[in-house]
C-alpha cells in the first residue's frame, strides 16, 4: 500500500452507528411532548417522571401478557395483528396517560388503575383503555366531588349480626344506624351490606344506603371470574375440557368492594371542578363502551336463530368455535386477556382486574 493510500485511509471519517431509542425512551418522549402541549412547558417534575415510568412498566407488562394469550389461541381464531408497542395508537395513549397522571392515578399502586388493550377496528391499532379500581374511584370522587363526606363507612351484614337503620324523621335529627357483630368468628352468611356518608360539621347531611344481597349481585360483572366470586368453572386437563369444578373464591371481599365502589360512585361530581383531564376520562369510558357495542354487534350479526330445541342436541360441529382454555376465541375481545396476578384457586382478591 502506498503512503498516499495509507493517508487517505487514515483520513476517512469513522461511521458511528446510530443508536435507536428504546421503546421506553420513545414512550417518555411522547408523554413529555403531550405534557408540554398541555401545560405550556416541557419540564416534568421528578414525581411526574416517576409516574410516567410506572405507566410504561405496567403497559409493557400487559402488552406482553396479552400477546402471549393471542399466540396461544388457535390460528383460526387469532387476530393477525400482534399486540406490541409498534401496533399501539401512541398519540391517543400519550394523551390518556397524561390525563390519568394529572388526576393522580398510579398503576403501580394496587386497585388504582388497570390498563386494558383492545382492537380499534377503525384504525387497525390497539387502543389502551384504563379501568378504574375501587381505590381509583375513591381518588376521583375525592378530587372532583361536590360534597365529599368526612368519612365513608362500608360494611357487610351477616346473618348473625344485629343491624338497625335509623332514618331521619321527627324523632331523629340525623340519619344513622346501629350495628353490632354478635359472633366475630362465625358471622354466618352474607345477607347484605351498607355504606354511610358522615359529615362531622353538617350531620344533617349524613346518608345511609342499604344494599341487599340481591342488590350486590346485580352489580356483579358479567364476566366475573370464579377465582374471585366463587362458583363453577371449566376444568381442563391436557388441553381438554373434562367438566366443571367448584371454586370457593373470595365472595366476601368482592361483595365488600362492590359496596365500596357504590359508596364513592354516589358522590356527586362538582361541575366547577371538572377539568380537561376529567373530560378525557369520560371520553375514554365512552370510546371503550362504543367499542364493546360494535364488537357485540359484529359477533352476533348474521346468525340464524332457530326456535326449535331437538330432543338430543347434536355434538358440536368440527367447524364450530370451541371453548378455549387459554382465552376468549374472539379476536377483538381482550377484556379478559388481562389475567389477574397469580390467577388460581388461591388468587388474591386485591388483584382482581375490574375491582
Image (cartoon, rainbow, N blue to C red):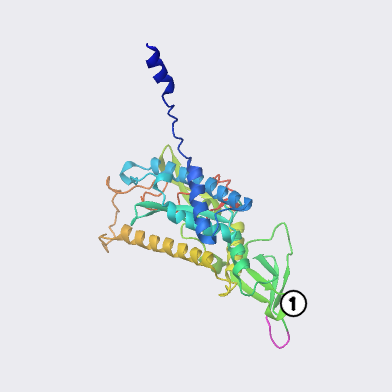
Q: Residue furthest bottom?
A: 170
Number of on-image labels: 1
Occupied quadrant, residue 195? bottom right
**Which residue is outermost to the front?**
4
Q: Is residue 177 above or below residue 133?
A: below
The stretch drawn in magenta includes residue 273: no
How many C-alpha atoms fall within 10 Å of the one at disc 1: few (<14), some, or many (≥20)?
few
What element does badge 1 sit on? loop
Q: Is residue 20 left or right of residue 184?
A: left
Give the percent coordinates (x, y) of residue 231. Answer: 52, 54
**How far from the left and from the top, in percent, is residue 260?**
61, 64
Quarter occupied by the C terminus: bottom right
Q: Nearer the viewer, residue 16 or 321?
A: 16
| Residue 296 x/y as whole percent | 35, 60
In the image, 353 versus 180, the foreground residue is: 353
Give the residue at mark 1.
201
Bounds of the magenta segment = 167-172
The x, y position of residue 169, in whole percent, is 69, 86
Res 213 visible:
yes
Residue 158 makes an appearance in the image: no
Quadrant where the image shows the N terminus: top left
Please determine whether, in this image, residue 67 is positioned above or below residue 165: above
The magenta stretch spans residue 170: yes
Q: Is 206 above or below relative to 336?
A: below
The extreme top residue here reads 1
Judged by its main secondary structure, the magenta piece is loop
Amino acid at each position: 500500500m502506498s503512503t498516499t493510500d495509507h493517508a487517505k485511509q487514515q483520513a476517512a471519517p469513522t461511521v458511528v452507528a446510530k443508536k435507536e431509542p428504546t421503546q421506553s425512551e420513545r414512550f417518555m418522549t411522547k408523554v413529555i411532548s403531550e405534557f408540554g402541549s398541555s401545560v405550556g412547558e416541557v419540564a416534568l417534575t421528578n414525581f411526574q417522571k416517576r409516574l410516567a415510568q410506572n405507566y410504561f412498566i405496567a403497559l409493557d407488562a400487559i402488552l406482553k401478557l396479552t400477546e402471549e394469550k393471542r399466540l396461544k389461541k388457535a390460528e383460526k381464531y387469532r387476530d393477525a395483528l400482534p399486540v406490541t408497542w409498534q401496533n399501539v395508537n401512541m398519540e391517543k395513549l400519550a394523551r390518556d396517560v397524561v390525563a390519568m397522571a394529572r388526576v393522580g392515578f398510579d398503576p403501580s399502586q394496587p386497585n388504582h388503575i388497570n390498563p386494558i388493550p383492545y382492537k380499534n377496528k377503525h384504525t387497525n391499532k390497539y387502543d389502551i383503555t384504563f379501568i378504574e379500581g375501587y381505590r381509583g374511584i375513591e381518588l376521583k370522587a375525592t378530587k372532583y366531588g361536590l360534597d365529599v363526606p368526612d368519612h365513608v363507612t362500608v360494611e357487610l351484614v351477616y346473618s348473625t349480626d344485629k343491624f338497625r337503620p335509623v332514618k331521619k324523621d321527627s324523632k331523629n335529627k340525623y340519619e344513622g344506624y346501629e350495628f353490632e357483630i354478635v359472633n366475630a368468628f362465625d358471622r354466618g352468611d352474607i345477607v347484605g351490606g351498607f355504606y354511610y356518608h358522615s359529615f362531622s360539621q353538617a350531620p344533617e347531611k349524613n346518608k345511609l344506603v342499604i344494599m341487599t344481597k340481591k342488590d350486590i349481585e346485580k352489580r356483579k360483572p358479567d364476566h366475573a371470574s370464579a377465582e374471585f366470586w366463587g362458583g363453577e368453572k371449566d376444568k381442563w386437563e391436557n388441553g381438554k375440557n373434562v367438566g366443571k369444578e367448584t371454586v370457593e373464591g373470595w365472595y366476601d371481599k368482592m361483595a365488600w368492594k362492590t359496596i365500596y365502589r357504590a359508596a364513592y360512585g354516589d358522590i356527586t361530581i362538582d361541575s366547577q371542578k371538572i377539568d380537561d383531564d376529567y373530560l378525557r376520562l369520560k371520553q375514554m369510558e365512552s370510546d371503550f363502551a362504543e367499542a364493546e357495542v360494535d364488537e357485540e354487534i359484529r359477533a352476533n350479526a348474521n346468525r340464524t336463530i332457530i326456535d326449535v330445541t331437538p330432543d338430543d342436541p347434536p355434538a358440536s360441529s368440527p367447524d364450530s368455535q370451541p371453548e378455549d382454555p387459554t382465552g376468549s376465541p374472539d379476536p377483538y375481545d381482550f377484556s379478559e386477556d388481562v389475567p389477574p396476578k397469580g390467577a388460581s384457586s388461591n388468587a388474591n382478591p386485591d388483584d382482581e382486574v375490574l375491582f
